[in-house]
Amino acid sequence: MSRKSFYVTTPVYYVNDVPHIGHSYTTIAADVLTRYHKLCGQDTFFLTGTDEHGTKIQQMAEKKNKSPKEFCDEVVEKFKAAWRNLNIEYDNFIRTTNPRHEDAVKEVLQKLYDDGYIYKGKYEALYCVGCEQFKMRSDLVDGRCPDHKTEPEKRSEECYLFKLSSFQDRLYQLIKSDKFKIMPKERKNEVLSFIKNEGLQDISISRDKAKVYWGIPLPFDASHTTYVWVDAFLNYLTGLGWPQDKNNFEKFWPPTVQLMAKDILRVHATIWVSILMALDIELPQMYFIHGYFTVNGQKMSKSLGNVIDPVALSEKYGADVIRYFMLSEFPFGTDGDFSIKRLEETYNSDLANDFGNLLHRTLPMMDKYCNGVVPEPKEEDLIDEDLKKIAQAVVGSLAGLYEELKFRDILAEIWRLVRRTNKYIDEAAPWAFFKEGNDERLSTVMYNTLESIRIITILTYPFMPETSQKIWEQLGITESLVSQRIPEDVGWGGLKAGTKIKKGEPLFPRIDLNKNNA
Ligand code: MSP
């Protein structure tokens, strides 16, 4: 799937909720991918944003005695602050209340109407306000929405419908053949069996304006507003500046990967893709569906009071620690649990013991043995060869793992090199060479250790941008970290002899687990 540009999207998040750790999970993953693809020299575009129309938001604003727009403006600031705190660097933050987005939605609806994809009819079904979605009987557990535990309302209304059913066969083939790829495989199969067993029915794309006024009016019938999902999907186009910004669109469309959790796969895999087909726009290359986070084994919910605030967390532990933890704890495509206990354990073992220790023993040795100046490597030994081989194997494994979004495996590979480098120091024992006055071996061992740290720092950058930058400064390398390229600059031997190390603040001090078991 190699192409020159890289375009990644997160869903647009509802502003009826403050940003929580679940939203952060998707957004951090998108940020890591973007930073990696930048290091690979690709032009990248990372889009995130907020979904601001619909019944729920209208109701929440009413409760707070605010206009919906006022209410949205406030929550949007919270999302932006959360992303700043977590070192998220998006290219655009799209809001579905942006007038350009609203105009584009109207344009699309008019086109779909003119081309015969939208018609007036009646829709009768069960509707869950919590999900803002009509539900099938098979979606319910004991007659209730499994996510909101409420009984959906029966709704029958005059509305405009989109001819989703007419895309069923094409869609099935596209997904089956991987021309439109859904990963992981189990998720793809889930969608295929849904299409096969339930079939696609035409869907209502409008609401009565008297009931849902907080929405985009249909351009061909102002007594109706646009169904929030149709409005929201179009963010993936308008976020690139479409339809005005043709350059950006040509450069980045279609999305290389759209990230989302399993709760919104079905609507994305059916409605969004069919709208694109109706508009004759190329489909996304891939959806990657990640798992759901529970907290201490329980589903996160406001009523349980266990919603984790990513801002408080990043203030306490540091953004990079959260980023590392979330992506190393369990595979990206499966469900997993979040607990502070595990976070602190992982911090101590992987970050304080392994990575922190590697830095804190190497840099003082450099001062003591080499006056802080990177020496020329000289006499090679077998043990040096082994370190180099592992470094090269780790570097070589990453592209394939990134392609499949195996963040956990990527980190495990990088940590293979971290641990091997620690072991290398133990085995090579540079302190003995220093004592003996064996300059040849001492120089080689110190060079190799630092070279390994240099490579590790480039590789950890997508996951831990702030910390990697600090380490890079300690290494004293004059070229910027972000200008490094994979694979060119992660080959062995890139570190220049003569570079002056700048010892800095210690990174990853150990957490006292007995004191901190909140
Ligand atoms: N607004 C819609 C999406 C429209 S996209 C055209 C929406 N928003 S949401 O705020 O509810 O966010 C849903 C997304 O947040 C999920 O798909 C997932 O990316 C993320 N997560 C929310 N809670 C989560 C967990 N507990 N665990 C993991 N991810 C979760 O749906």
Image (cartoon, grey):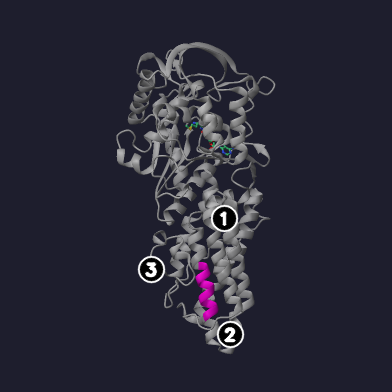
Q: Classify 10 Å Cα crowding around label 1: few (below 14), some (14-19), many (20 and above).
A: many
Q: Which amino acid does the dot numbered 1 rest on?
A: Ile
| Circle on res. 433 | 2
Kind of residue sitting beneath label 2? Phe
Helix, strand or loop for disc 1: helix
* Residue 324 location (% of width, % of height): 56, 53
Report the predominant secondary structure element of the magenta stretch.
helix
Q: Quadrant of residue 413?
A: bottom right
Label 1 and label 2: CA atoms lie apart by 34 Å
What residue do we see at 47% from left, 19% from top?
163
Quarter of the rendering containing residue 70: top left
Q: CA distance from mark 2 to mark 3?
A: 29 Å
Residue at (61%, 76%) from the top-left corner? 383
Q: Which residues are magenta?
A: 444-453
Which disc is residue 410 wearing? 1
- Looking at the image, residue 169 lies above or below residue 452: above
Amino acid of disc 3? Thr
Q: Secondary structure at mark 3?
A: loop
Residue position for label 3: 478
Residue shown at the point (44%, 34%) measured from the top left? 50
Local crowd size for mark 3, using a 10 Å CA cut-off: few (<14), some (14–19), many (≥20)? few
State the residue at coordinates (62%, 47%). 331
Q: Position of residue 264 (x, y in %)?
A: 55, 32
